[in-house]
Image (cartoon, helix red, strand yellow):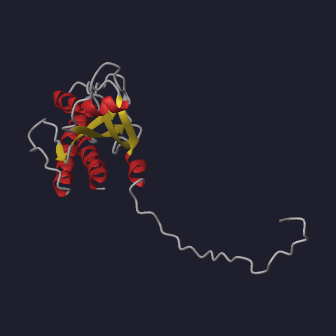
């Protein structure tokens, strides 16, 4: 899948550009570089897969559209101050998941809406440390947030998700069952 590889490629490009900067602001530079480089690679991947990406423009998050799904990306570090719900673009995209949320977590009194669109994000998880694998994500996950982004309706590692859609290996059936030909002799007690 091109999107998974593009996120890794963007993260590696960002690390190469930021690794020689002064340690005092290296983390900030790396974060900015990740945003820009991963945005560029994500854009290329969406375009190659026919997902109608939004244009590259400054700090704007690149998003795509395929069928009823909006597609975005999120970077996350394993640090407590990182707030994934802060971005207005992500909040606006997550609003589209109200219908899916009503299927996963039904409301006692609410009626489900029509399903006009839904949003899925590729979540690239980083260690948050320069000493532990700063050049690439620790994992890339496919996530569907609730409409308010306070919980995940679906969250799974992309590699595990893709295994469901791999072609099943066909196995030839060489079993040749045969029925016995001989008759069972009766002793006269059965009818």
Q: Quadrant of residue 155?
A: top left
- Confirm whether residue 55 shows in the render: yes
Q: Quadrant of the N terminus?
A: bottom left
Farthest top residue in view: 109
Q: Nearer the viewer, residue 15 or 125?
A: 125
Q: Nearer the viewer, residue 30 or 137?
A: 137
Residue at x 70%, y 76% (from the top left corner): 179
Residue at x 16%, y 31% (from the top left corner): 89
Q: Quadrant of residue 38?
A: top left
Q: Position of residue 94 (x, y in %)?
A: 23, 31
Q: Position of residue 133 (x, y in %)?
A: 39, 42
Vertical arrangement, residue 133 with respect to residue 94, above or below: below
Q: Position of residue 156 (x, y in %)?
A: 40, 41
Q: Nearer the viewer, residue 150 or 78?
A: 150
- Confirm whether residue 138 shows in the render: no
Q: Nearer the viewer, residue 65 or 56?
A: 65
Q: Quadrant of the C terminus?
A: bottom right
Looking at the image, how many numbered discs can be counted on the residues?
0
Residue at x 9%, y 38% (from the top left corner): 58
Q: Tell me: 130 left or right of 173.
A: left
Q: Tell me: 37 left or right of 153.
A: left
Farthest front residue in view: 191
Residue at x 30%, y 34% (from the top left corner): 100
Farthest bottom residue in view: 181
Q: Quadrant of residue 32?
A: top left
């Amino acid at each position: 899948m091109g999107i998974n590889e593009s996120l890794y490629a963007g993260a590696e490009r960002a690390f190469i550009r930021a690794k020689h900067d002064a340690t005092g602001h290296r983390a900030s530079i790396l974060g900015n570089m990740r945003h820009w480089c991963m945005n560029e690679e994500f854009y290329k991947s969406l375009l190659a897969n026919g997902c109608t990406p939004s244009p590259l423009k400054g700090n704007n998050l690149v998003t795509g559209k395929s069928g009823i799904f909006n597609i975005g990306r999120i970077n996350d570090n394993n640090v407590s101050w990182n707030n994934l719900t802060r971005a207005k673009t992500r909040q606006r995209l997550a609003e589209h998941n109200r219908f899916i949320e009503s299927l996963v977590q039904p409301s006692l009194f609410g009626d489900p809406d029509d399903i006009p669109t839904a949003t899925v994000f590729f979540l690239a998880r980083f260690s948050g440390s320069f000493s532990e694998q700063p050049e690439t994500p620790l994992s890339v996950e496919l996530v569907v947030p609730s409409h308010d982004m306070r919980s995940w309706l679906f969250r799974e590692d992309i590699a595990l998700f893709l295994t469901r859609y791999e072609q099943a290996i066909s196995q030839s059936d060489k079993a040749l069952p045969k029925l016995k030909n001989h008759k069972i002799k009766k002793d006269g007690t059965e009818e």
